[in-house]
Image (cartoon, rainbow, N blue to C red):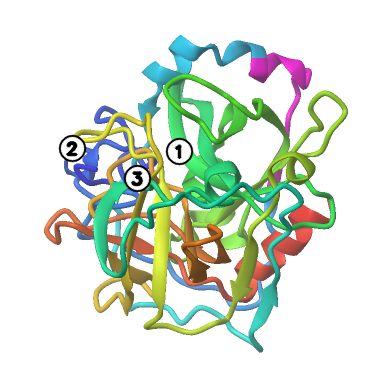
Amino acid sequence: MRRTVRGIPAVHGIPAPHPARRSRAALGALTAAGTLLALLLPTGQAGAAPQPGHHSSATPQTTPGAFWTADRMRAAAPLDLATPTKRSAPAAVPRSAPLKVAPTLPRLPKAGSLLPGSLPQAGGPWTGGGAVVKTTGRVFFTYQGRNASCSGDAVTSGNKSTVITAGHCVKLQGAWHTNWVFVPGYHDGQAPYGKWPAAKTLATPQWTASEDINYDVGAAVVAPLDGKKLTDVVGGQGLSFNSGYNKAMYAFGFPAAAPYDGSKLIYCSGNTIKDPLFSSDHGLPCNMTGGSSGGPWFTSFDEKTGTGLQSSVNSFGYQFWPNTMFGPYFGDDAKNLYNQAQTS
């Protein structure tokens, strides 16, 4: 991560460091998914916000999948978040009654014979098998003329086609990404379950309007592939909204900035804290780097089956606070985004 937002353009802004480039370079800031910025900050919150913004693909559904060859996927730069431009007091993310959505796993793979270990884990390859190796994947897209990567997760949904990721993994610095595809179960240039192009990408209204770090949540509705829908092929994880802070969680992603290379599914686990600085995010001990942005955080995660309830995504990290990643609180706005995506 170098920490900048994992998978995010340098904490979102990413220019040169690759987005996931460790926030250090990346703007020194959020390391999306882990690294970043000390500035992380919320740009002001928004209680009753408008509907989440969205971007519909203007290109044929087959184009993105064909564009993303094995070599292009391997070479895609991790996207990192840029540093926030102003500071403000942490905003309280709107909340209501807790809501849980159960996982949908029509083809649950066998769990590995070896469990990765018990809490905590600051970062290492996931060897436990289970559903998470199929539902979690890499996200590839074109950002400011360059090919970049993040992570994402297939979730239970009415349309069987919804992927949850970070807001900066669908839109950054005012522009929606193009050539967007989700590759579940990615491994070293391989797409064992296909490359799923987005028919539509969406983000919370606060991210869409001002890229507020408190609401760094995005979604994609992917088109059918070979006549099949996403979760009929790989299954879908559950979700949990308004579930509170200070939880035991597992985070997954495909960090691509050193010391990682994007070829393996990496995980962290431990007890979360509430960010005491510039956001209302969860914090978790984790050394994932750029490219992991958008990967899922689970509560109630079962190592034996690889299933859980998604409650956040890898978003950013402070440059001055190593080995700690932050992820947005899944409150009402994240819930509304999920509902809009699954009914699209």
Rendered residue at 19%/42% (across/down): 2
Disc 1 secondary structure class: strand
The mark lying in front, picked from 2 and 3, is 3
Identify which amino acid the numbered label 2 is placed on. Answer: Ala
**Residue picked out by circle 3:** 6
Picture coordinates of residue 172, whole percent (x, y): 47, 41
Picture coordinates of residue 145, whole percent (x, y): 46, 18
In the image, is 169 to the left or to the right of 337?
Answer: left
Pointers 1 and 3 in contact (CB under 8 A)?
yes
| Relative depth, front residue between 165 and 122 | 122
Q: Nearer the N terminus, badge 1 or badge 3?
A: 3
Q: Which residues are magenta?
A: 54-65
**Residue picked out by circle 1:** 150
User: Cα distance, mark 2 to mark 1?
Assistant: 17 Å
User: Cα distance, mark 1 to mark 3?
Assistant: 7 Å
In the image, is 27 to the left or to the right of 334?
Answer: left
Could one spot residue 174 in this view of the protein? no
Disc 3 secondary structure class: loop
Q: Nearer the N terminus, badge 2 or badge 1?
A: 2
- Place residue 21 in its image quadrant: top left
> Per the image, is 61 magenta?
yes
Picture coordinates of residue 206, whole percent (x, y): 56, 62
Identify which amino acid the numbered label 3 is placed on. Answer: Arg
Picture coordinates of residue 277, whole percent (x, y): 24, 74
Numbered badge on residue 25: 2
- Place residue 268 in its image quadrant: bottom left
Identify which amino acid the numbered label 1 is placed on. Answer: Cys
**On-image quarter of the N terminus:** top left
> Per the image, is 44 magenta?
no
Rendered residue at 20%/33% (across/down): 258
- Place residue 120 in its image quadrant: bottom left
Crowding at mark 2 (Cα within 10 Å: few <14, some 14-19, many 20+) = many
